Amino acid sequence: MGRAPCCDKANVKRGPWSPEEDATLKSYLETHGTGGNWISLPQKAGLKRCGKSCRLRWLNYLRPNIKHGGFTEEEDNIICSLYSQIGSRWSLIAAQLAGRTDNDVKNYWNTKLKKKILVGKISLSIKNSSTNAPPASVTNIPTIPCSTSPILYIPKAETESTVTFSDHYSLTQSSGAFPTLSDAGYEPVISSTTQNWSQNHFQYSSFPGIVDMSEFRASSMNSHIVSPSQEGSTMSDSSSLAMDNKGLSLPSTHGGPEEVGILMDSELGFPSDFVNDLLFQDRESEVAANCFQYFADYGYVDMKPQGLNQGVTNHY
DNA sequence: AAATCAATCAACCGCGCGTCA
DNA sequence: GTGACGCGCGGTTGATTGATT
């Protein structure tokens, strides 16, 4: 049995809103507010509309101080920066842009920004660690709780260390901060055989709000969890997180802030699929996106299957 | 001028989550 | 503990508009 519909679709008007309907809704909301219940609102307001439709209309068009179109370059940068960190959390991204709605930002991204990036007008990039800070105007990004976006807090290594993401994948680094793997579907996976750090080694994200240590569950660090979603993963044996010349921005040579792009080469068809679906494929995209800032610290990180190539390489 | 294609964006849909009885 | 309900979200659709042939 499916979910009951939110309204009687046979008796509600659909499609574009008329100026009269807009005026009715706006007038009612300005006088009475939502009353805490959108479902019953259209009836009270005398509208033959679904409550959800009313809510959408109000939030996206009728409420005060809404801006449409004319995205500035700074807004572009903010959207790109946040997308690279948190993915398609449009409501969170929109919350950082005054007067913008999630629908607007989403449409803008899908129709314009993606293309700008593809033709190189904008680079989806992140500055190197020395300047690894959010744009000045990006503040107070809400915390993403573990329940929706479990974050793997990986200890800062003092020497070469390996973190295993599943039975088959690991990341190795020589020094500096580890990348963070954050993904809504991938459970944090750390092999107990390769982890023996104490909690005081943990490093906080330099992006306030993105990492919330209060959500940290230390117990996960000691367990060897293999997510069902990881088993039979679509990642190929040659999956790698690397910077090469296939797209996005390229890492510069040393000296000065570097812009770093991350691509995932997988059997899912990258880079051709990149053209159709900018930030990679499904889960991979989120993993890559959430690793952005941390890989920027590396210059180059290979993510290779264990056992096939033990010589995981770091290039600096 | 007409037909076709592409781009845009408002609106809809279904799902996850939180709340409450 | 559980089911119903409403809200909010991201993904998708489809009508409209503009550009091209």
Image: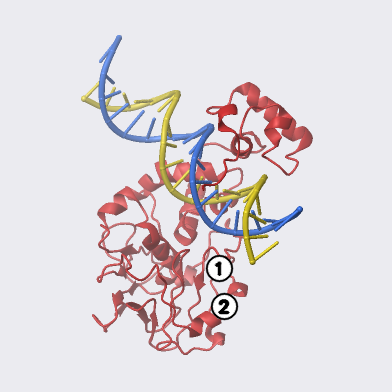
Chain colours: A red, B blue, C yellow
| Image quadrant containing the C terminus of chain A | bottom left
Element carrying mark 2: loop
x, y percent for residue A134: 53, 62
User: Which label was assigned to residue A217?
Assistant: 2
Residue A258 is tagged as: none
Q: In the displayed structure, would residue A20 be above or below residue A190?
A: above
Q: Mark 1 Cα within 10 Å, few/some/many (few <14, many 20+)?
A: many
For image coordinates 55% across by 67% down, the residue present is A207
Q: Which of marks 2 and 1 is nearer the N terminus?
A: 1
Residue count near mark 2 (Cα–Cα under 10 Å), binned few <14, some 14–19, many ≥20: some
Residue A276 in view in this figure: yes
Q: Nearer the viewer, residue A106 or A222?
A: A222
* Amino acid at circle 2: Arg
Q: Is mark 1 on a helix, strand or loop?
A: loop
| Residue A64 shown left or right of residue A18 in the figure | right
Q: Is residue A139 visible?
A: no
Q: Name the residue under label 1.
A: A146
Q: Residue at x 73, y 44 (%)?
A: A36
Q: In the shown orientation, is residue A57 left or right of residue A270?
A: right
Query: In the rendered view, does C2 fall on the left or right side of A286?
Result: right
For the residues labelled 2 and 1, say whether their Cβ atoms are less than 8 Å apart.
yes
Q: Given the image, on which type of amino acid does mark 1 rest?
A: Cys
Q: Percent from the top left, x then y, of residue A159? A: 41, 89
Q: Where is residue A129 in the image (x, y as percent from the top left)?
A: 46, 72
Q: In which quarter of the image is residue A34?
A: top right
Report, in whole angstroms, how far the alpha carbon at label 2 lies from the one at label 1. 9 Å
Residue A185, given in percent of the width and then of the height, sits at: 45, 64
Of all chains, the one bearing label 1 is A
Q: In which quarter of the image is residue B6?
A: top left
Residue B12's place in the image compared with A199, above or below, is: above
Q: Quadrant of residue A124?
A: bottom left
> Subunit of mark 2?
A
